Image (cartoon, rainbow, N blue to C red):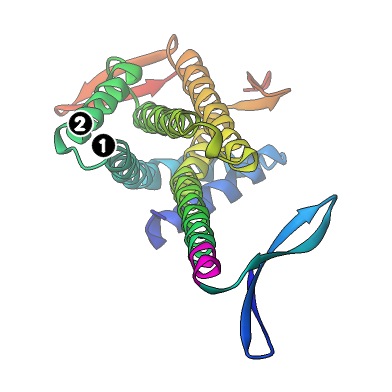
Amino acid sequence: MIELTDGARERVRELRALSKKVEGGDKGARTELRRALRESAPDVVARCSDVAKTYRGMLAEKMATGDPLFKEATVERAERMALELAGEHPTPLEVLLSERVASLWMLVELQEALMAAYYNKGGGTRVSVVLQMARLQESAHRRYLAAIKTLAQVQKLQGPSRVQVNIGGNQVNVSR
Amino acid sequence: MAWERRGGNLYYYQSERVDGRVRKKYVGTGEIAELVAHADETIRRTRAERRERVRAELEEARGLASAADELNEAAEILVRAEMVAAGYHRHKGEWRRRRDD
C-alpha cells in the first residue's frame, strides 16, 4: 500500500469538509475553500504526483517480470502518456488527473496480461479463479474510463475560459 | 487416502466421491500400496502448492489494484473542491455552473 503523508491526508480531509459545506449552501465557506485550495492544493497535488509515480513503478515492476529495460520503457511510456493527456500549459489538477489516467492505464494493461496468462494455462485453472481475475480486470477498466471522463470534464470546463499569464517567471493559469 | 492397520498388517485405502458421498476404496498392501500412496501424496502436495500459488497471485493482483486507492480518492476530492470553489455543482453526474455565480 502506498499512502499520502499525514499532512497531505489532513489537507485533503479539510478540502472535502469545506466542499461539503459549500455544496450544503454555506456561501461563506466558498471563500474559505478557495483560500484552502490556494494554500494546500499545490502540496497535495505534488504529493499525489509522487504517489502516482511510485505506483507506476510498482506496476511496471510486476509487468516487467525482472526485465529492467521493459520496466523502464513501460514507465517512460506512461510518463509520456500523462504529459500528452495533460496538454499544453496544464493546471496542477490536470497534471494530477493525467497522471492518474496513465497509472490506471498501466493497471488495466497489467490485469489484461495476467488474465491472458490464466487463459493460456489452459484447463487447469479453476473457474472461480478466472472469475475473480475477470472482476479485478473489469474494476480496473471501469476506474480507468471514469478517470478519463473526469479529466475530460475538467479540461472541458477549465479549457475555454482559462487564461494563462506569466507573473515573475511563474506560469499561472487563471479561470474566468 | 489412509493407511489402516489390521492384525499387524498395513492396508492402503483411497477416498473417492461418488454421487456426492465419500466412499473408501481398497487399494492394497505392500510395495504396490506404498507406490500408490507415494503417488497420491505427490499429487496432493502438487495441488496444494498450485492452490497456494494461485491464491498468492490473486492476492498480489488485488493488492496492486487497491494500492493507489487513497491517491484516487484524493484526486476526486481535489476535483470536487476545485469545481465547487469555481462555482459548479453536480447535477445527474455532470458538473454545471450555478446561475447565481
Instruction: Report helix, strand or loop for mark 2.
Output: helix
Residue B49: percent from left, percent from top = 46, 58
In the image, residue B33 sits, relative to residue B59, either above or below, namely below
**Residue at mark 2:** A70
Rendered residue at 46%/45% (across/down): B61
Given residues A125 and B59, the one toward you in this image is: A125
Q: Is residue B35 magenta?
A: yes
* Residue where numbered disc 1 is placed: A64
Name the kind of residue labelled 2 in the image. Phe
Number of residue marks: 2
Q: Amino acid at mark 1?
A: Ala
Location of the N terminus of chain A (image quadrant): bottom left
* Closest to the observer, A6 or B87: A6
Tell whether label 2 touches label 1 (CB within 8 Å).
Answer: yes
The residue sitting at 32% across, 42% down in the picture is A62
In percent of the image, x 46 and y 34: which residue is there? A121
Residue span colored magenta: B31-37
Q: Majority secondary structure of the magenta segment?
A: helix
Q: CA distance from mark 1 to mark 2?
A: 5 Å
Q: Quadrant of residue A6?
A: bottom left
Question: Dot 1: within a 10 Å radius of its alpha carbon, few (fewer than 14), some, or many (20 or more) residues?
Answer: some
In this view, the residue in front, B18 or A83, is B18
Looking at the picture, do discs 1 and 2 lie on one chain?
Answer: yes
